[in-house]
Image (tube, rainbow, N blue to C red):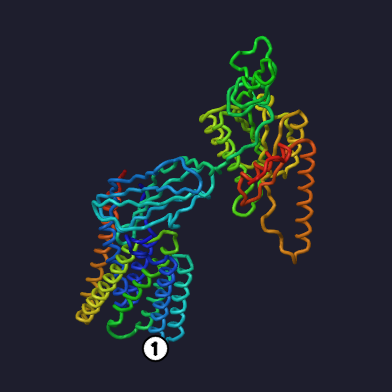
Amino acid sequence: MGGGSIKARGTSQVRLATAAAALGLAAVLATVSALASSDRAGWLWGFGVVGVLATLVALAGWAGATWWGVVALGTEYTVLHIGGGPVDVGAAFIATGLLLLTEFVMWSLDARSPVVNEAEVTKRRVIRLGLLSLGTLVLGSSLVSAGTLARGAAFARTVAGVVCSIGILAVVTWASVRQRSRDRPNT
Amino acid sequence: MTRHPSPKLAGFASVAAIFLVGALATGRPELVVMASPFVVILVAGLLTAEPPVWTTLSVDIERDRLVEGEAIPLDVRIAAETDVERVEVVLPLPGGISVEDDDTALAFHLPRGRSRNVTLRLRFPRWGVYELGDLYVRAHDRFDFFRYDDRLDARRPIRVFPRTETLRMLVRPAQTQLSTGNQVARRVGNGIEFAGLRPFVPGDVVHSIDPKTTARRGSPWVREHHPERNTDAVLFLDTFSDVRTGSSTTVERAVRAAASIVSVYLERRDRVGLVSFGGVLRWLMPGMGIRQEYRIIEALLDTEVAVNYAWKGIDVIPIRTLPPKALVLAVTPLLDERSVGALFDLRGRAFDVAVVDVSPVPTEPPPSDDVVSELAHRIWTMERQTLHRDLRRVGISVAEWRDGDHLQRAVWEVEASRRGGRLRYA
């Protein structure tokens, strides 16, 4: 069923397209990091394979594996830079890739249900995904720039990190409490 | 309305926490960069998530009575005070109901203050009583961290009447009853149908004198007529067994045949009763009129095969269900010994019995290369022919009604054999 005269894309097509995108993205993220260094190739390939396999398992229907895949691929990238120099500019792209990977897996799993999305729902999801990717790139680049600027001020960075962590925890707690208070009986 | 956190919420929080703790442990800022989108989206999702406030949430079905094969629209009307990113409307359907677009679940965006109508066209290919389930409505927030489920009571019985076939002729009972009807009685009396002439006897009505015959014979002769009377017919529905032949089963076809026959008998002002003879015995006393028609159709809608191995004879049928001089018209696949035995017993008790054999024989014969199947098929059809001959031998007219044939053909054949083969199917 499509919106008005617009025919919605078939559910199986969406599922396959998003699954292929997620798997491709996971493979790219795993390969890029693994090929960047030959010292820790074993570790890097290990985490990469775990990431891709976890993505495969997630796409097979176990949503919980998504997060293992994301963590494995993120860890692979981090292992590459442990003991390295300043913050890598590529982190923003990896962050965007991991977010997109998560969204594609979720989308593919959603498309397994018999619910048929109208074309407008798909369009809005694609736009949201684009905006989130752009926002992640901007945010990641800003953080990378901030990290580069603050180089050398170790104490100040630690303090800023602790303050940010406390702030994040406070915001998450406050938002959760607010969310609970919003839930009210409805008709 | 119930709220459920989606797996995405826990996942985002876990990934963000692992990356941040990892960043503290390893001292690598890359992990902070990777955690940042998950944290920001998590916070944004928690801040913006709000349950939808439905202003309209209703389900409406056009009518709850229809004829099999028809489709009826089911309208779901939905509107919310809040902007809902994605609304899923799901209607689980019981078996036997199909949706024309094959979509019983639909997702759409619902802007604030706008209402939306979703129409599902439900098709009922088979007669029966259907019960629609609840309608499920699920709303997703913008970042899909929470899902809000609502359930709408769409349960209502929908009665799908069997499709009837047009019948121009029915099986005429051998004997009529006393009430006025459309059937010409054998005996003479007040009526329209000419019966014969006889000499005038004292007490005869003067205006019944036939002038021409009187003039020719030289003594008064009177005309005699057959009165128009009604008849009693009892439909004997065999529900012991059900066999699929082609697109439908024998019980489905039998119920369609019974509904068609009942409506025509009742149109002719005859009294019609029903005996559903199977694992569960059901009956309706003979009656007439539109109310009786609906009673019988309602009883037919509940027809189903209940497996039962107990031997049942006609002793279990209430005596008043089978009035004297009634025609017992059996609609049966002649598969179960109990129903076949009951027919012989009824005939043995001098009931006027006729049989429409709802043939379970497949329209397509088995492939010729499968020798065993072909032989089994031949033996089976020969056994059925023998059974038909045995029934005819005791005075029960029987005609085979094959899947795809018009019911009128079988009814005509029964009537023709009852009238000594003088009637022809054309």
Quadrant where the N terminus of chain A lies? bottom left
Q: Nearer the viewer, residue B56 or B401?
A: B401
Q: Residue at x 78, y 44 (%)?
A: B387
Q: Position of residue B405 (x, y in %)?
A: 62, 50
Q: Is residue B278 visible?
A: no
Q: Position of residue A33 (x, y in %)?
A: 38, 83
Q: Nearer the viewer, residue B405 or B315?
A: B405
Chain to which mark 1 belongs:
A
Q: Is residue B123 visible?
A: yes
Q: Does residue B331 lie above or below A74 as drawn?
A: above
Q: Residue at x 75, y 28 (%)?
A: B350
Q: Position of residue B75 (x, y in %)?
A: 37, 48
Residue B416 shown left or right of residue A58 in the figure: right
Dividing the picture into quadrants, the one containing residue B303 is top right
Q: Nearer the viewer, residue B161 or B107?
A: B161
Q: Which residue is mark 1?
A: A37
Q: Residue at x 39, y 45 (%)?
A: B152
Q: Does residue A66 lie above or below B82 as drawn?
A: below
